[in-house]
Structure formats: structure tokens, C-alpha cells
Image (spheres, helix red, strand yellow):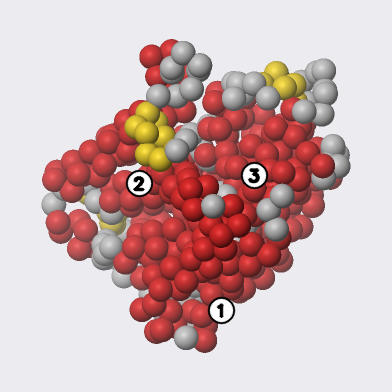
């Protein structure tokens, strides 16, 4: 059993992410890599002393090779490709336009992934609302809907559902969550409209006006051919979930073939194929797109660099918490759908939602149910599977680190002059708005 105190480095790193940008912003911007290295070593060194250097090395390499590498390559590819698409015209940010854009992004998330939809939609939304002063709430609701909830309808939408698909859950089964998503969309977009309407009128009253030549809806998209490369990336993600089940990618024992790194750490061939396709898509995107589009988008590398650095530390230091969860998950006494919804969701708010989903899916499969969805992990009642899936996907919106695109969207918004809420400030937004929504979800769908 992993001692609880080994989770201190993870808590310390989260505290740095939350507090230092408020009290020492310039120091934090310059010394993020040093802070990440400090907290990572504070976990790795005691872990190595307790369990041996070999085991510690395998643990770190396992999360770096099989979790972090594919995570950051996917983010990098979508960041590059989306940065080569720009939207311009007479469509200026207003409450109705913003509601429409958020609804569009939410639906797109299930078909090109929450990360893909976030990277594709965030710059146009920022650009259309550039004339406004009060706009941070637009990005907050963008994270709620596009970066998280919208990904619940297909395995492409969010990694936890892809893991479920790899373990026997049918590809289109997640469409069962359509009523929950539509309910949440209607509720959140209604709340957003009234908040944005008030902010919009405040901006207009202060003399701010959109810079448009005429009141029309003409839209011009440059770099639209990059949608081909987004499709390539989505195809790579689908392949990474389907190829491991093919006999040609398995050895005689059924293990997935790959490149041996150290001990039992293997970089699988399906992962290599995924990475190669994504990097090729990013390369072709840059080669085939005029640099003026990136200048128009104010494209820089700072956002992806910040995410890459911080999430190295997050992935390493959260290992003890994940180990504790895997060891204790079946003993927590969680047997009802509403319990699964909240347990999966609250832990997914701070830990990687993919292993959290798998822990509770495994727990549900071991409870001995005879009806419901038959998976590789056992039979799981439909309502319980819905609760686990919704908790993992929806509650990633609770914090900036709850889902991959959250922090990226925040960084891009900060880079474009939008003063985003701090880590704790965002928690106030999510607690005040999302918690009542999740309580209603519980009462209507998971009891």
C-alpha cells in the first residue's frame, strides 16, 4: 500500500499552480520548470528509496511513455493545425452569436474530440469578442461546454470513453448520454446568455463597439484545408483505440507489441503509429499554410510550452494518488449510480480522468451484476455505466487541470489579453454554476 504522504508533491505542485501566479507572477513564469523538477524529485527520490530505483524508473517511464507522450503529442498536433485556421468577417461577438458558437463547439467536441474542438473554436471566439472588455465568462463557459461536456457522445470525444470502447463498450453506446448533454447544454447556455447579455450591455454603455464595416454575417475562413489534417489526427486517435485488438499487433500471450524501453515499459506500435500520423499532420499543416494566417491568429509557442512543462510534473507526481485509488477503489463501498457519478467526477477533477474512469469501471464490473452492458471487465448496469462516463467527462470542467484542453484554453486566452480567473477563482465559477447542474443531473438521471 502506497503511503498517503507520497501524495504531498502532487498537492504541492497544484498549490504552486494555484497560488504563485497570484503572488509571484513573474517568478512563476520564469521558474515553472524548476518548480516542476523540484516537486517531481520530491516524489521520485523517496519512492526510489522505498521501492528501489528500478521500480521507480519503470513507474516514471510508464507514465511518461504511455500517458504523457501521447497526451502532449495530441495537444501539440491540434494546437499547430488549429493555429493555421483563421476566421474573419462581420460577425461580432454578441450574446446570441456567442450562444450559437458555444453550441456548435459543444456538438463538435464529440466528433473531433474536446481538444480538437477547443483548439479549433477558441481563437475565432476570442477574435469575435476582441472589442469587448467583459469577456472572461465567455472562456469559462467555453471550458465548461466545449472543452469538457461536449465530448460525452463518442469515444473520440474524450479519452475515458476511448478506454471504455477498448474494453468492450460499443462505439455508439455513448449516445445514451444525449439527454443528459442536451439538458446540461440548455441549462448552461441559458445561464450564459443572461450573464453575457448583462456584460454586453455594460460594454455598449461604455462606448465599446465592434469593428465591423456593416451589420452583416459575412464570414471568411482562411486555411480551411487544415480540416483535412484535423481529420488525420482524429483518425490517428481512433486507430490507437482499435489497432491493439488486432492479432497482428499482439504476441502469443495477447500482449500488445511495441518497442521495449525498460523492464515492462513498452511503447506500443499502435501508439507509434498514432504519434507519427499526428506529427505528420502538424508538419504538413505548417508546410501548406501561409505564415500570415499564424500572424493574424497571434500564434506563438508559449501556451503549448506552458502546458507541456506543467503536465510533466502533474503526470509524475499524481502516480501515488492513482496507485492509492486503484488499490482502494473496490473497497470504497460505492455501489449505486449516483455514487459512481460523484466519485468518478470529483476525482477526475484533479486526477487524470482516464485511469479514474477505468478504476470505477473495473469496480462496477467486479460487483457481480448479471444485467446491463457486458464489457471485458464484467457486466455493468446501463445507468451505472452512464454515471461513470458522465462523471469522468463532465466534472473535468471543475478545475483547470481536470481535462487536457482546459489549461490550454486558459493559456491562449491569457496570451490574447483576456484576464482569466486564477485557479481558485475558476473553482468559484465552477462550484457556483456547475455544482447545481450536477445535482440536477443526479436527481434526474442517476438516482
Mark 1 vs 3: CB contact within 8 A: no
Where's residue 214, x and y in %?
30, 62
Secondary structure beneath disc 1?
A: helix
Where's residue 46, x and y in %?
57, 63
Task: Kindly report the distance in space between the C-alpha atoms of the residues bearing marks 2 and 3.
Answer: 21 Å
Q: Residue at x 48, y 48 (%)?
A: 54
Instruction: Return the residue at label 2.
Output: 73
Is 86 on the left or on the right of 331, as rendered? left
Is residue 377 positioned above or below 15 on the image? above
Instruction: Return the residue at label 3.
Output: 356
Instruction: Return the residue at label 1.
Output: 19
Is residue 375 positioned above or below 131 on the image? above
Residue 305 quadrant: bottom left
Residue 195 quadrant: bottom right
Mark 2 or mark 3, which has the lower sequence index? 2
Mark 2 vs 3: CB contact within 8 A: no
Task: Kindly report the distance in space between the C-alpha atoms of the residues bearing marks 1 and 2.
Answer: 28 Å
Where's residue 27, x and y in %?
41, 84
How crowded is the residue under tag 1: few (<14 C-alpha within 10 Å), some, or many (20+)? some
Is 194 on the left or on the right of 225, as rendered? right
Task: Kindly report the distance in space between the C-alpha atoms of the residues bearing marks 1 and 3.
Answer: 26 Å
Q: Residue at x 63, y 49 (%)?
A: 322
Where's residue 348, x and y in %?
64, 51
How crowded is the residue under tag 3: few (<14 C-alpha within 10 Å), some, or many (20+)? many
Is 81 on the left or on the right of 93, as rendered? left
Amino acid at each position: 500500500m502506497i503511503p498517503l504522504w507520497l501524495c504531498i508533491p502532487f498537492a504541492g505542485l497544484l498549490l504552486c499552480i494555484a497560488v504563485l501566479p497570484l503572488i509571484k507572477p513573474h517568478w512563476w513564469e520564469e521558474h515553472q520548470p524548476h518548480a516542476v523538477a523540484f516537486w517531481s524529485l520530491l516524489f521520485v527520490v523517496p519512492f526510489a528509496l522505498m521501492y528501489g530505483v528500478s521500480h521507480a524508473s519503470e513507474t516514471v517511464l510508464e507514465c511518461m511513455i504511455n500517458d504523457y507522450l501521447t497526451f502532449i503529442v495530441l495537444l501539440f498536433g491540434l494546437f499547430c493545425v488549429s493555429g493555421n485556421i483563421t476566421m474573419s468577417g462581420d460577425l461580432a461577438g454578441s450574446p446570441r452569436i456567442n450562444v450559437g458558437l458555444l453550441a456548435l463547439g459543444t456538438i463538435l467536441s464529440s466528433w473531433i474530440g474536446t481538444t480538437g474542438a477547443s483548439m479549433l473554436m477558441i481563437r475565432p471566439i476570442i477574435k469575435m469578442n476582441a472589442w469587448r472588455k467583459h469577456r472572461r465568462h465567455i472562456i469559462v463557459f467555453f471550458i465548461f461546454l466545449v472543452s469538457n461536456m461536449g465530448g460525452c457522445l463518442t469515444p473520440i470525444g474524450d479519452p475515458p470513453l476511448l478506454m471504455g470502447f477498448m474494453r468492450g463498450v460499443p462505439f455508439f453506446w455513448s449516445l445514451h448520454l444525449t439527454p443528459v448533454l442536451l439538458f446540461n447544454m440548455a441549462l448552461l447556455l441559458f445561464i450564459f446568455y443572461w450573464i453575457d447579455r448583462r456584460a454586453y450591455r455594460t460594454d455598449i454603455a461604455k462606448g465599446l463597439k465592434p469593428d465591423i464595416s456593416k451589420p452583416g454575417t459575412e464570414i471568411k475562413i482562411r486555411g480551411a484545408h487544415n480540416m483535412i489534417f484535423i481529420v488525420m489526427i482524429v483518425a490517428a486517435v481512433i486507430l490507437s483505440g482499435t489497432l491493439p485488438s488486432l492479432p497482428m499487433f499482439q504476441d502469443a500471450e495477447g500482449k500488445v507489441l511495441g518497442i521495449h524501453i525498460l523492464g515492462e515499459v513498452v511503447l506500443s506500435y499502435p501508439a507509434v503509429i498514432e504519434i507519427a500520423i499526428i506529427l505528420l499532420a502538424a508538419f504538413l499543416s505548417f508546410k501548406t499554410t501561409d505564415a500570415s494566417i499564424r500572424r493574424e491568429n497571434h500564434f506563438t509557442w508559449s501556451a503549448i510550452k506552458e502546458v507541456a512543462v506543467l503536465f510533466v510534473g502533474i503526470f509524475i507526481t499524481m502516480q501515488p494518488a492513482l496507485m492509492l485509488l486503484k488499490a482502494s477503489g473496490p473497497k470504497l463501498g460505492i455501489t449505486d449510480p449516483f455514487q459512481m457519478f460523484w466519485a468518478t467526477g470529483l476525482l477526475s477533477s484533479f486526477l487524470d480522468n482516464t485511469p479514474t474512469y477505468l478504476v470505477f469501471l473495473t469496480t462496477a464490473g467486479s460487483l457481480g451484476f448479471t444485467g446491463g452492458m457486458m464489457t471485458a471487465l464484467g457486466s455493468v448496469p446501463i445507468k451505472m455505466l452512464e454515471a461513470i462516463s458522465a462523471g469522468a467527462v463532465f466534472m473535468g470542467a471543475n478545475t483547470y487541470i481536470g481535462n487536457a484542453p482546459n489549461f490550454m484554453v486558459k493559456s491562449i486566452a491569457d496570451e490574447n489579453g483576456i484576464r482569466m480567473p486564477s485557479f481558485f477563482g475558476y473553482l468559484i465559477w465552477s462550484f457556483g454554476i456547475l455544482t447545481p447542474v450536477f445535482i440536477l443531473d443526479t436527481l434526474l438521471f442517476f438516482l
